[in-house]
Amino acid sequence: MSGVLVVVEQHAGRIARISWEACAAAQHLGAQLSLPVSAVIVGAQVEAQISEVAARGLPRVARIEHPLLAQYTADGFTLALEQFVKAEQPDYIVFPHTYQVRDYAPALAARLGQVLISDVVAIGDGPVFTRQLLQGRLNGSYRHVGTGPCIISVQAGAFRAGETEKCAAEVTVVSPTIDPTQIRTKPGEPFRGSSQTVDLGSAQLIVSVGRGIKDAANIPIVQELATALGAELAASRPICDNGWLPMERQIGSSGQTVSPKLYLAVGISGAIQHLVGMKGSQCVVAINKDPDAPIFEVADYGIVGDLFEVVPALSAALKAAKG
Amino acid sequence: MIAILPTLAEPQSFSLSEKLLFAALAMASVYSFWNLFGRILNKILQSKKDSSFRLFPITKRIWDFFWEVLCQAKVVRERPLPGLAHAFVFWAFCAFALVTLNHCAVAFGIGFLNPAGEFARLYFYVAAAFAFACAAGILGLFVRRFLVRPKWLGEQLSYQSGVIALLIFVLMATYLAAFFVTDAGPDARILWWVHTLTLLTFLPLIPHTKHLHLVLSPATVFLSRGGFAQIPPLAGDEDFGLVAGADLTQLVSLQAYSCVECGRCTEHCPAANTGKLLNPKEIILGVRAYLNNLGPASDQPLLGKYNSQEAVFQCTTCGACEFQCPVGIEHVPILVGLRRGAVNTGAWEDEHGGKLFLALERGSNALGLSPAERDKFIEKQALPIFDGTQEYCLWLGCMGGYDPKGREIVTAFARVMKFLGTSYGVLRKEKCTGDPVRRLGNDLLFQQLAEANLETLAQNKVKKIVTICPHCVRTIQEDWKEYGAPPQVEHHSEFMARYVDKLPKQPSEEKVVFHDPCYLGRYRNVYDEPRKVAALAGDLVEAPRNKERSFCCGAGGGLAFLGEEDGERVSHKRAAELVATGAQTIAAACPFCNTMFRDALAATGESAPQLLDIAQLTARGLPE
Amino acid sequence: MKIIVAIKQVPERDAQVRINAAGKWIEEVDLQYALNESDAYALEEALQLKEKHGGEVTVVSAGPERVGQTIREALAKGADRAIYVASNDLGSRDALGVARLLAAAIQPENPDLILTGLQSEDLGLGQTGVILAEVLGLPHASLILHVEKTETGLTVKRELEEGWFQTIELPTPAVLTIQSGGNKLRYATLMGIKRAKIKEVRQVTASDLGVDVPPVVLMEGVTMPHKQKSTQMLGGSPKEAAAALVEKLKFEVRVL
C-alpha cells in the first residue's frame, strides 16, 4: 500500500479530538512526502465511526473488527495491527499519543523490528520528528534510519485538527486472526475514582479560592466558576480554617499537594505554604487585585483585577465557549 | 552575747546496747541505701560511653558547679520564692555536714564538736539559723505542693514528697529543739534518737525517690555536654541514635536519674502549653522508667511503652526545657536522640516528614521548589554574586531564597548593607543547611547537605557569612562542625548592632515589641543586639515572656514542615501575647517566626499590629 | 515473589540545561543525578509486595559508572541485590536496543514479576517496560498504580484518562510499568545506607550480554525550546480579560 497510515482510536463509539489531531499530523506528513494517507480503526463493531473518519478528508479507511477486540487489550490490538501492517506495508504509521497507544504501540513496533517515536510535537522536513526531553526543557530531533515502517505517536494539541473537505470513503473491512489464548490479560470495566471523598490529587482542573473572597457567602461565585470549567474547588488554608470549605479541600503545606493541568488561583496571595502545595501544576492562572501578589511569580497567566468582577465574567465566557 | 544564748544539748554516755542498736540501724540504713543506689549507679555506668564527651576545658564546669549547685543560681532566679526556699534547704544540708557527723560520733562518745566551745557554739548557731530557714522553707514548699498545687508539679499528689518533707522538718525541728533542753535530761536523749531515726529513715529513701538528685545532681551539672542543645555526633556504623536501652549513654542515664520532677521544663514548653501530648518532664521520667524496668542493655524500643513517638515529634527544640532545668538535664539532645532512633531506622512514618526528606533527597531546598526560583529572585533584586573578593557571603537560606516574606527581609537587609557600604555577595547555589532534618534526626540527609554545602563554601573561598536566619546560623556554626570546618557566621542582628551608630534613628513614637527567636536567644545568647537595632525604629516594649524565657513561635525542630498541629497553635498563643503588649509593631529576627506570626496575626484581623523583621524596620529609615 | 525492578539514573529534576558542544545532549559536568521518579514508585511497589508476600527484590540498571550511586540508593531503600549493566554508550542505542540489553540481563533470573517506571524524566519515551515485555514474551500492563498478588497471578489497578481507572488480571510472570503517585515513597535512612554496603551488586557488561543491534531510530541533536516561562498578564476590562483567558485556555493550555 505504502503511504501514511493513521490509527484512529475509539472508546465506546466515541472518537476523541486527539485522534483527529493525529489525522491532521498524518495528512501533514503525507503532503510533505507526497504520500497517500489512509486511516484504520480497531474494535469489535466500528461501522458507525467510519463516516466521521471519512468526514476528515481521509478517503481510505479500514475497519479491523474481531469479537476479541471488543475490549481493548494490548495483545489483541498488537496482533490485529501487526497482521494489518504486514499486509499493507505502510511507510509511516501515525498514532495519537494516548494511554492506550502507550500500552501497545511500543510492543507492536518491537514486533516489527521498529521503535516508536513517541509524543511527537512537530514534524519537519526529512522527516525529522521533534520530541520534548527533560520535562519540556529541551527538544530532541529524531530520525528514522532503518528499513520498514516509521512509527510515531503525536502529542495532544501539537497538531490542530482542522476542518477539511468531506469526501467519500473507500472502506475495507479486515478480520484478523486472533486466538483467545493469545489474549493474556483480562481487563475489567472502567470505573471512576471514589466520589465520596474529594481527591484533589488526581484532579486535572482545580479552581482555588483564598482570602480575597472575604466572606463565606461569596464562595458560590467561585463554585460557579469551577462548575463552568468542570474543575474541582479547592482553597488556601485560611478559608478552611474558617470553616468556609472543608479541610480536605485545603491545598498547601498542611493540606494537599496537587499537580493538575490547570490551577486557577482566585484571591490567593501566594504565601509559601500555599505555593508548595500547587507548584507542580502544569499551568497556573492567577486572579488577584494586588499586582505585587507573589502568586503572579508562579503564574503562567495573570489577571489583576477585582475578583468579584472578573470571576463572574469568566464563568459567563466559559459557559459561552463550551456551548 | 553568745555566752548567754542556749547551747546545743548533747546526750552523754550511751549504753552499750544503745551503741549497738545505733550501729546496727546505721549499718542497715547504709546498706539499704547502697543496695538501691549501687544498682542505679551500675545502670548509669553500664550505659554506653559518650564518645564525644570531653572533660576539658574544666573552668566552665567548675564555675557552673559553684554557681548553679552551690549558689543555687538558676533554682532561685527562675522560680524565686520556691527557689529560695529550696536553696535554704540545700544550704542547710550543706551546713549540717559537720553537725550530722558529730551527732553520730556522739553515740560512741567521740563527738568532736564541744557545744560549749567557741568554734562549735558559733557553728551550731549558724547551723541553727539555716535549720530555721530550712524548716520554714520546707513548710512553705509543703503548702505549695499540697495546698496550692501548681499545675507543673503534676496532676497526682506526690506522697513521697510529703514524707520527705516531713522527715526534713523533723530533722530541723529536733535540732532546734535541742537548744532548749539540757545535756543530762531524758529529753536530749529522746531528741537525739528521734533525729537519728529520722536520719536513718531518710537515707535509704533517697535512691527510691526523686531525692536521688541530692547525690546525683552536682555530678550532673558538672558533667554537662558543654554547649546548649548540643547534639552529639553518632559513634560509628552501628549507632543510629537512641533506638533502645542499649543506646542510652552514661550522660543520658545520669540525667534521667537526676530529674527532680519540678516541672520547670514542662512549664515553659510550647507544646505542653498548647495541649499537646509532649511533656518534657514525662520524657525524662519515661527514660528513667525504662531504665528501672528494662535496664541499660535492653533492645526494646525506647519509643514504646514508656515514651511515645507522637510526643517526641511535637518538640520544636526551642530549648526552654533545657534552659530551665536546675539539675543539668539536657533535654534537647535526648529528644533529638529519640527522633534519630526513629528516623535513622525508618521507623518514623509521617506524610509531611517523608515529603520533606524526599524533597531534600532529590533537590536543594526544604520547600521542594526549583532552584530556578531562587535564581530569579537574585536576578530580580540584582543581588551581587559572591566571587571571593567580597567581605561577606550573604547566605539566603530556604526562607530567604524562596519564601516571599523571607525574600522581603533579604531585600531589606541588602539595602542596609548597601547603605553601610559593606561588600557582600550571594552564592550561586545553596542547599538547605539541613536544620530541619538535623532536628528531626535524619543523619543521612544532614550529612549529605552539610558536606555538599561545606564543599561549596570551600570552593568559593567563603570566609565570613552573614544571614537573616538564626537556624542557618546555628546549623552552620555548630552542627556542620561534625563534617568539616565551617567559616565564621553571624546573624544580621549582630551585624547591624555593630553599626547602629551609623544607621538612622527614626523619629517615631511607635511601640515596638521584639520577639526573641529561640535559635538566636537561648541558643546563641544574643538578646541585646536585635533590641539595639529595633530601638532605632520606635519605643521598645517587652513581652511578658522575653529574652531567655521567650515563648517559641512553633516552627523549630522541623515542625514548620510537618503540617498542622493538633489543638491550640503555638504561634497563635505567642502572637496573642505579643499583641497584648499593645505594641503597634512586632519586630522579628527570624524568617520562620515571621511566617508563623503572619498567619496567626491574619486570624486576628484588621487591628493586628504590623509584623516586620528588624532589617525591614531599619531599611524603613534609610533614604530612598 | 522474585521481583526485578529496572531503574534508571537521570539528571536531577532542577538541573541546569545547557546544550553540550556536540549539540547532541546537555553538558554533564556539574550535573547531579537522581533515581528516576516513577522508578522510585516501582521500587516502592516492589518493596511493599516483598513485605507482604516474602521473596526478593533485585534492581537492574544500565549505564556508566555513576549509576552505581543510584543502585546503592535503591539497595539502601530495601532492595536485596543489584545487577549493574556497565555501558558507556547507552545514548547510541534506541529504545529497542536498551530493552534488549536489559532483557538479556534479566532473563537468566527468571523473575515472577518485572517492574519498571512509567517513563524517564530525561528522554521520557515511556516504552522500555512495554518493549521489555515484548522481547521477553511476557504479558504486560502499563500505568499501574497498585499491584495485588492473587492465586492465579496478579490483579492490578491501571490509570485511564480523565479520572477513570481499570482493574486488569494477568498471570505471572509479567511486566508492569508503574505510574507515579500510587504509594507514599519511603525515605532513605542511615540504617539502609549502612546495610546496603554489604549487599551484592553483580556487574555485567553489554558485550558480555552479546546484544548489539544497529538502532532504527536516532536522536540527531537537541535544541532549546522557544517559549520561555514568563507570566502573561491579561489586561483590559474584566470582560475582556475573561475572554482573553478563555482563548488561552482553549488554544494554549488546551483544557477546554
Image (tube, coloured by chain):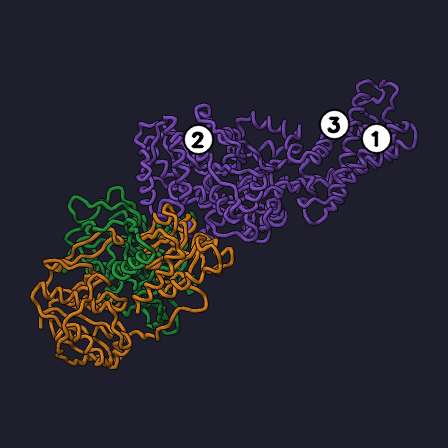
Chain colours: A orange, B purple, C green
Q: Earlier in the sequence, mark 3 or mark 1?
A: 3
Residue A292, position as x, y percentages in the image:
37, 45
Q: Position of residue A145 (x, y in %)?
A: 11, 59
Q: Quadrant of the N terminus of chain B?
A: top right
Residues tagged by mark 3 and mark 1 found on one chain of the structure: yes
- The chain containing the residue under callout 1 comes to B
In which chain is the residue bearing label 3? Answer: B
**Which residue is label 2 attached to?**
B621
Residue B264 in view (yes/no): yes
- Work out how far the residue at label 1 is from the one at label 2, CA to CA, in angstroms: 67 Å
Q: Residues within 10 Å of mark 3 (few under 14, many from 20)?
A: many
Report which residue position mark 3 lands on: B95
Q: Earlier in the sequence, mark 2 or mark 3?
A: 3
Residue mark closest to the camera, 1 vs 2 = 2
Depth check: give the residue in front, A106 or A191: A191
The answer to whether marks 2 and 3 sit on the same chain is: yes
Q: In the figure, B162 relative to B175: above or below?
A: below
Query: Residue at label 1?
Result: B176
B588 sits left or right of A169 in the view: right
Left-right relation of A77 to B425: left
Q: Secondary structure at mark 1?
A: helix
Q: Rate crowding at label 2 as few (under 14), some (14 to 19) or many (20 or more) other CA atoms within 10 Å.
A: some
Helix, strand or loop at mark 2: loop
Q: Secondary structure at mark 3?
A: helix
Question: Can residue C195 be seen from the camera position used here?
Answer: no
- The residue type indicated by label 1 comes to Leu
Report the amino acid beneath label 3. Ala
Q: For the point 37% across and 66% down, which residue is it?
A: C147
Residue B38's place in the image compared with A302, above or below, is above
